Image: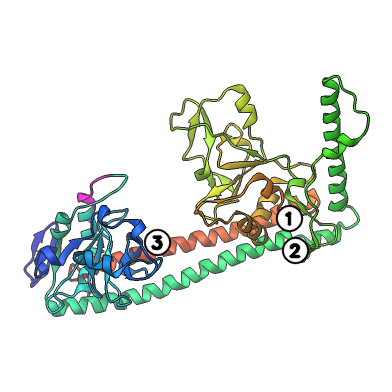
Amino acid sequence: MSEVVEIENIQLPEGWVMALLADLAENPKNDIVDGPFGSNLKANEYTETGVPIVRLQNIKRNYFLNKNIKCVTTKKAKQLARHSFMPGDLLITKLGAPLGVACIAPHDFQEGIIVADIVRARLPEDKVNTKYIAYLINSPSVIQQFKRNTKGTTRPRVNLKFMRSLQLPIAPYEQQKHIVTKIEELFSHIDAGIEALKKSQQLLKQYRQSVLKAAVTGELTKEWRKANKNKLEPASQLLERILKERRQKWEEQQLKQFQAKGKVPKDDKWKGKHKELALITGEERETLPEIPVGWVYTRLGNVIEEPKYGTSKKCSYDSSGIGVLRIPNIANGKIDSEDLKFAQFDDSEVRTYQLLEDDILTIRSNGSIKLVGKCALIDANMTEYLYAGYLIRLRPNKRLADGSYLINALNSAYLRNQIESKAKSTSGVNNINSGELQALIIPICSKEEQILVNVQVDQRLESIDRLALEIERQLVKAEKNKQSILASAFLGRIQ
């Protein structure tokens, strides 16, 4: 039986030794270093060309993500030469969640600079296989070392002293190369499966958009329309009647306001002040997908009440007040009330920010353009909440539009393109205001058909969601299989 020693609960095969990371370097002080203090490398010194900088976002477990690379000038790089890396160096994160993520510096760059939250280890390749060490640091036993020694909660971190003192089971040099070859062989099969799963994810996203497109172009309800073609009022007629009623209601309100002030209008000029949304232009119509007879394109503002911005009142996790829905509560078309904040409101404020069943909350401002305009439907269980200022409330005219139908339309590619076009900004924060939301062009059919569209969409999206969940499970399983391989590899159990 092989003689073993037990250190840090790891049993080492014969010929293996437990060593510190510092033991593997020829000159630990110079070969294992972290990045410069923040004051020595500021974001305003970054350039688009020059010597590349490696940041936390570029370090992934067992691979380098060559994306969003910033640079510094050659002069600045010379000042930071101690914090440089070369192809083949080991790069490890010492801040973040998770931390202790390791990869090999790529050969894409001849040289580069690490930031303060990264450690660079330069190991003698004739004595230590750096890939072996990278895989080892990403293995369960070393990950546990990081977890046991992490400081801080909002910014989890370890220091350079700890990094140099990482305890690592080291196999004989030739066996290190064999282990790396075997890991990469086993990983290649798993990675092929992961790639196939990710392609399936993309196909599901495309199918989801196909479903939404079919929903808002009448394709899903084509057979139903054939069976009911003589029973339904065309949406255009209903819309025209509703808009006429809206104008009449506004005129009645205006007249009451005049009379309340003791005035009697002598002519009808005051009626012309009623603001109506702009008609759809010929140029806009050229971009619109074809819709069935009986459907109509109109501005979103024509099928909803006046949009309302949310409260700017400061909220907290003190649950003594009224719950306030925020951007984090908007999730996949529904409200997620898990992360809820609260504030105190008087009766007038409650009436102003009140929510009703079938209301829609939409995100009006965000750094991510993909989140601007994302919506959630208010159901009967959510009407007790109010809503915050980065959200806008859209209240459908119930005679014209169903909330679920509007959300399906707003999530379709055509409406998303409109939203992102209006919201996109170069300032870093993307916004869409209530006027821009009202100006969106949306296809409307009869209320009866909208309800049927929702049923058809829900059935298809439920199937998509089930498949998407299974793919996520398989991806998690694949990553667990990788960790099992690494665990076995560094106990000498793979041949």
Marks 3/1: CA distance? 41 Å
Left or right placement of residue 120 versus residue 13 in this view: right
Reading the image, the residue beneath label 2 is: 288
Q: In this view, does 437 lie above or below 421?
A: above
Reading the image, the residue beneath label 1 is: 441
What crowding class fits label 1: few (fewer than 14 Cα within 10 Å), some (14-19), or many (20 or more)? many
Residue 148 within the magenta-colored segment of the rendering? yes
Q: Which amino acid does label 1 sit on?
A: Ile
Q: Which amino acid does label 3 sit on?
A: Val
Q: In this view, does 102 lie above or below 376?
A: below
**Residue 367 rendering spot, x and y as whole percentages:** 50, 52
Between residue 246 and residue 51, name the one nearer to us: 51
Kindly check if marks 2 and 1 are in contact, taking CB atoms under 8 A apart as contact. yes
Reading the image, the residue beneath label 3 is: 476
**Residue 494 rendering spot, x and y as whole percentages:** 22, 74
What crowding class fits label 2: few (fewer than 14 Cα within 10 Å), some (14-19), or many (20 or more)? few
User: Where's the C terminus, which quadrant?
Assistant: bottom left
